[in-house]
Amino acid sequence: MSYAAINYFLMVSGISLDFSLWHTNISEVTMKQAMIRSAREVILLADHTLFGQESVAQIAPLSVVNRLITDDVLPASIRLNLTKMGIQIIIAND
Protein backbone atom coordinates (compact mmCIF):
# COMPACT_ATOMS: atom_id res chain seq x y z
CA MET A 1 0.00 0.00 0.00
CA SER A 2 1.38 3.42 -0.87
CA TYR A 3 0.44 6.67 0.74
CA ALA A 4 0.20 10.04 -0.92
CA ALA A 5 2.86 12.54 0.08
CA ILE A 6 1.63 14.98 2.69
CA ASN A 7 2.49 18.32 4.16
CA TYR A 8 3.18 17.90 7.86
CA PHE A 9 2.52 20.83 10.19
CA LEU A 10 4.90 20.26 13.11
CA MET A 11 4.74 21.78 16.56
CA VAL A 12 7.60 21.40 19.03
CA SER A 13 8.41 22.46 22.58
CA GLY A 14 11.75 24.03 21.79
CA ILE A 15 14.45 24.75 19.22
CA SER A 16 17.94 24.64 20.67
CA LEU A 17 20.73 27.04 19.72
CA ASP A 18 22.34 24.28 17.64
CA PHE A 19 19.05 24.11 15.69
CA SER A 20 17.66 20.84 17.02
CA LEU A 21 13.92 20.31 17.47
CA TRP A 22 12.74 19.24 20.95
CA HIS A 23 9.50 18.00 22.50
CA THR A 24 8.28 17.47 26.06
CA ASN A 25 6.22 14.33 25.43
CA ILE A 26 8.51 11.35 24.84
CA SER A 27 5.64 9.16 23.65
CA GLU A 28 4.94 11.57 20.76
CA VAL A 29 8.54 11.83 19.55
CA THR A 30 8.52 8.53 17.60
CA MET A 31 5.26 9.50 15.90
CA LYS A 32 6.61 12.93 14.97
CA GLN A 33 9.78 11.34 13.55
CA ALA A 34 7.70 8.93 11.42
CA MET A 35 5.56 11.78 10.13
CA ILE A 36 8.67 13.80 9.23
CA ARG A 37 10.06 10.84 7.27
CA SER A 38 6.83 10.35 5.33
CA ALA A 39 6.08 14.03 4.65
CA ARG A 40 6.63 15.69 1.34
CA GLU A 41 7.08 18.99 3.15
CA VAL A 42 7.59 19.77 6.86
CA ILE A 43 6.14 23.10 8.00
CA LEU A 44 7.18 24.16 11.50
CA LEU A 45 4.82 26.32 13.55
CA ALA A 46 6.94 28.12 16.16
CA ASP A 47 6.97 31.59 17.63
CA HIS A 48 10.14 33.36 18.75
CA THR A 49 9.87 32.09 22.35
CA LEU A 50 10.72 28.52 21.30
CA PHE A 51 14.18 29.42 19.99
CA GLY A 52 16.97 28.77 22.47
CA GLN A 53 14.86 26.21 24.35
CA GLU A 54 15.57 22.51 24.89
CA SER A 55 13.19 19.97 26.30
CA VAL A 56 12.97 16.30 27.26
CA ALA A 57 13.55 14.56 23.92
CA GLN A 58 15.16 15.57 20.65
CA ILE A 59 13.00 14.99 17.58
CA ALA A 60 15.30 15.87 14.69
CA PRO A 61 17.65 18.53 13.37
CA LEU A 62 16.00 21.71 12.16
CA SER A 63 17.30 20.90 8.68
CA VAL A 64 14.27 18.60 8.16
CA VAL A 65 12.05 21.70 8.04
CA ASN A 66 11.10 23.25 4.69
CA ARG A 67 9.08 26.22 5.97
CA LEU A 68 8.73 28.06 9.27
CA ILE A 69 5.60 29.96 10.21
CA THR A 70 6.51 32.34 13.02
CA ASP A 71 5.89 35.77 14.49
CA ASP A 72 7.61 39.03 13.56
CA VAL A 73 9.58 39.16 16.84
CA LEU A 74 12.02 36.44 15.73
CA PRO A 75 15.46 38.14 15.65
CA ALA A 76 16.92 38.98 12.26
CA SER A 77 20.08 36.96 13.01
CA ILE A 78 18.03 33.78 13.49
CA ARG A 79 16.00 34.53 10.35
CA LEU A 80 19.24 34.91 8.40
CA ASN A 81 20.61 31.58 9.69
CA LEU A 82 17.36 29.81 8.83
CA THR A 83 17.32 31.29 5.35
CA LYS A 84 20.91 30.11 4.83
CA MET A 85 19.69 26.62 5.78
CA GLY A 86 17.15 26.81 2.95
CA ILE A 87 14.13 27.25 5.22
CA GLN A 88 11.43 29.55 3.90
CA ILE A 89 10.17 31.91 6.62
CA ILE A 90 6.54 33.00 6.70
CA ILE A 91 5.60 35.74 9.17
CA ALA A 92 2.09 35.32 10.58
CA ASN A 93 0.14 38.51 11.16
CA ASP A 94 -2.16 39.06 14.14
Image: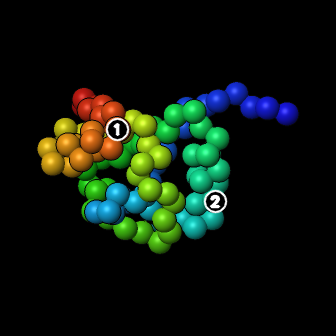
- Camera-nearest label, 2 or 1: 1
Can you see residue 69?
Answer: no
Task: Please state if 29 lies on the left or on the right of 47 as rendered.
Answer: right
Q: Could you tell me which residue is drawn at 65 percent across and 50 percent down?
A: 34
Residue indicated by mark 2: 30
Task: Please state if 41 lies on the left or on the right of 52 as rendered.
Answer: right
Nearer to us in this view, 8 or 49: 8
Secondary structure at numbered mark 1: loop
Task: Please state if 62 lies on the left or on the right of 10 as rendered.
Answer: left
Q: Return the residue found at the far right.
A: 1
Q: Return the residue found at the far left.
A: 76
Coordinates of residue 55 in the picture (x, y in percent): 42, 69
Q: Could you tell me which residue is drawn at 64 percent across and 41 percent down?
A: 38
Q: Quadrant of the C terminus?
A: top left
Coordinates of residue 41 in the picture (x, y in percent): 52, 34
For label 1, the crowd category at 10 Å Cα-Cα, with few meaning under 14, some 14 to 19 and many 20 or more, is few
Nearer to us in this view, 2 or 71: 2
Residue indicated by mark 1: 86
Q: Please identify the quarter of the rendering in which residue 43 is found.
A: top left
Check contact, mark 2 vs mark 1: CB within 8 A: no
Q: Please identify the quarter of the rendering in which residue 72 is found.
A: top left
